[in-house]
Amino acid sequence: MPKNKTHSGSKKRFKVTGSGKIQRLQAGRKSGAAFASAPTTGSRKKHRRNAGLVELAPADVKRAKRLLGR
């Protein structure tokens, strides 16, 4: 029987921690981000708040694990 393949889009979006939790990027980061070459929108507070990873909602964990082959 062949091996299961990991969903390519999911492996770019999710990270599995050592304890098995799934993390995702904070929403609202892509548009209006603070870059040196582009004009910035939003406050510094907003950019700090949207930085980093957050834990995936419990309702989405089952689907994400299946896409990641876990």
Image (spheres, helix red, strand yellow):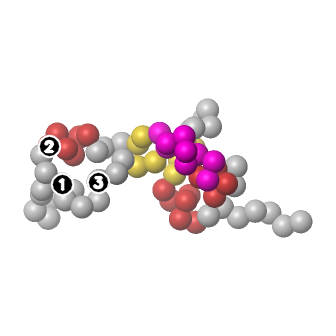
Q: Quadrant of the N terminus?
A: bottom right
Report the Cα–Cα distance between label 2 and label 3. 12 Å
Q: Which quarter of the figure has residue 30? A: bottom left
Q: Horizontal and vertical percent for residue 34?
A: 18, 54
- Which element type, helix, strand or loop, lies under badge 2? helix
Q: Which amino acid does label 2 sit on?
A: Arg
Q: Residue at x 40, y 49 (%)?
A: 25
Q: Is the magenta stretch mostly helix, strand or loop?
A: helix
Which of the numbered marks, if any, corresponds to residue 34? 1
Q: Which residue is drawn at 36% across and 42% down?
A: 52
At label 1, counting other C-alpha atoms closer than 10 Å, the crowd grade (few under 14, some 14-19, many 20 or more) is some
Q: Horizontal and vertical percent for residue 65?
A: 64, 50
Report the Cα–Cα distance between label 3 and label 1. 9 Å
Q: Residue at x 75, y 62 (%)?
A: 4
Q: From this viewpoint, which residue is outermost toward the front?
A: 59
Residue that mark 2 sits on:
44
Sequence-first disc among 2 and 1: 1
At label 3, counting other C-alpha atoms closer than 10 Å, the crowd grade (few under 14, some 14-19, many 20 or more) is some
Q: What stretch is highlighted in magenta?
A: 55-63
Residue that mark 3 sits on:
29
Sequence-first disc among 3 and 1: 3
